[in-house]
Image: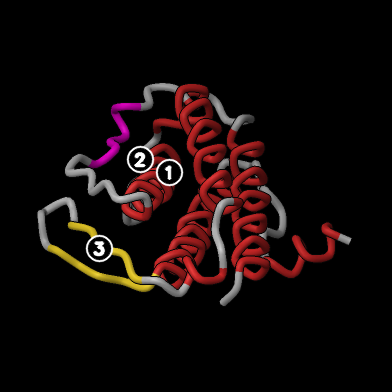
Amino acid sequence: MNKQDILILYQYNQWANAKILNTAANVTQDQYLTPASFPHGGLRGTLVHALFAEWIWRNRWVGTSPTKRLKPEDFPTFESLRTRWADEEKALMSFVDGLTDEKLVSKFSYKSTEGTPYERILWHAMAHLVNHGTQHRTEAAAILTDLGHSPGDIDMIYFLIDMK
């Protein structure tokens, strides 16, 4: 994995997140809060989980191991979530922009929220995060579609077509 490859993955991640968030902006407050049978609950729980993953992994990559999780209750409105996500996206893309090929293949250490220590290769964890986001964006897309607000295709190939 090299910097150009990881940059494309993270640009895709940004594009796909935007499609989900732009669509989610159309739901009512009740729809945002409505429970669902997905692993992280309804739309709010699913989006908060995806945001949490981006936040905690970026923190781990810069040497901080947060011990707390972001919780759905931290985001009572969609706008509160969207504002926080915009801030996180800036920090995440700044991190990605500052990478080198050498840094991508280096190891980093962190602790889980439970305190368990781990060591990983940076690009492996970074690829994991995009893949993780794909799963939860898909869940959010299913919830949004059920609410009558499909985000459309969020596959990477459509991002690549849009890039041209």
- The residue pinned by badge 2 equals 35
Amino acid marked by disc 2: Pro
- Give the CA distance from mark 1 to mark 2: 18 Å
Identify residue type, mark 1: Leu
Question: For the residue labelled by badge 2, is the local secondary structure a helix, a strand or a loop?
Answer: loop
Residue drawn 58% across and 36% down? 24
**Residue for badge 3:** 109
Quarter containing the N terminus:
bottom right
- Residue 70 lies in the magenta-colored region: yes
Image vertical order of residue 101 relative to residue 51, above or below: below
Segment tinted magenta in the rendering: 69-74
Residue behind mark 1: 51
Give the mark, 1 or 2, whose residue is nearer the N terminus.
2
Mark 2 or mark 3: whose residue is earlier in sequence: 2
Instruction: Find numbered disc 1 in the image and state the secondary structure of the residue it sits on.
Output: helix
Q: Nearer the viewer, residue 75 or 26?
A: 75
Between discs 1 and 3, the one toward the N terminus: 1
- Label 2, label 3: how far apart the Cα atoms are: 36 Å
Query: Which amino acid type is shown beneath numbered disc 3?
Result: Ser
Q: Residues within 10 Å of mark 2 (few under 14, many from 20)?
A: some
Residue 62 visible in the displayed image: yes
Residue 67: in magenta span = no
Residue at far right of view: 164
Give the image location of residue 72, x and y in percent.
Answer: 32, 34
User: As displayed, is residue 24 above or below residue 164?
Assistant: above
Q: Which mark, by number, is residue 93? A: none
